[in-house]
Image: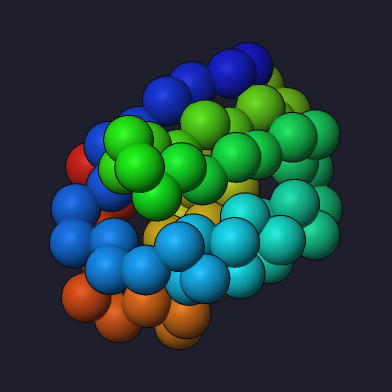
Amino acid sequence: MKKRFKLVDLDCANCAAKMEAAIKKLDGVQDASVSFLTQKLMVEAEDSRFDAIMQEIVKVCRRIEPDCTIQL
């Protein structure tokens, strides 16, 4: 399953790159991209565990950029 999400308050391109790298390492994630310019997150992950994977992604992103939120 591939989905796009809007990011709110993503402050720097470096943080976006760190978030993307961390998301790609998560179990069940096939691909991910974080765009600082468009403030968007694209995630391709297993259909059966997508919601659980998204919860892990939210935790990872909050650790890297505490002010950033993902509009689910």
Q: Nearer the viewer, residue 19 or 13?
A: 13
Can see residue 55? yes
Identify the residue at image location x=30%, y=81%.
Answer: 66
Q: Nearer the viewer, residue 23 or 27?
A: 23
Residue 55: where, in percent of width, then height?
46, 55
Instruction: Specify the farthest residue to the top.
Output: 1
Identify the residue at image location x=71%, y=61%.
Answer: 21
* Image quadrant where residue 33 sits: top right
Q: Quadrant of the N terminus?
A: top right
Q: How is the image coloured?
A: rainbow
Residue 49: where, in percent of width, then height?
65, 36
Task: Tell me: residue 32, above or below residue 4.
Answer: below
Q: Is residue 11 left or right of residue 26?
A: left
Task: Tell me: residue 72, above or below residue 57.
Answer: above
Q: Quadrant of the C terminus?
A: top left
Task: Tell me: residue 29, above or below residue 27.
Answer: above
* Image quadrant where residue 63 sits: bottom left
Residue 10: where, in percent of width, then height?
29, 61
Can see residue 62? no
Identify the residue at image location x=23%, y=42%.
Answer: 71
Identify the residue at image location x=59%, y=18%.
Answer: 2
Tally of numbered discs: 0
Q: Is residue 53 left or right of residue 11?
A: right
Q: Is residue 68 left or right of residue 12?
A: left
Residue 12: where, in percent of width, then height?
37, 68
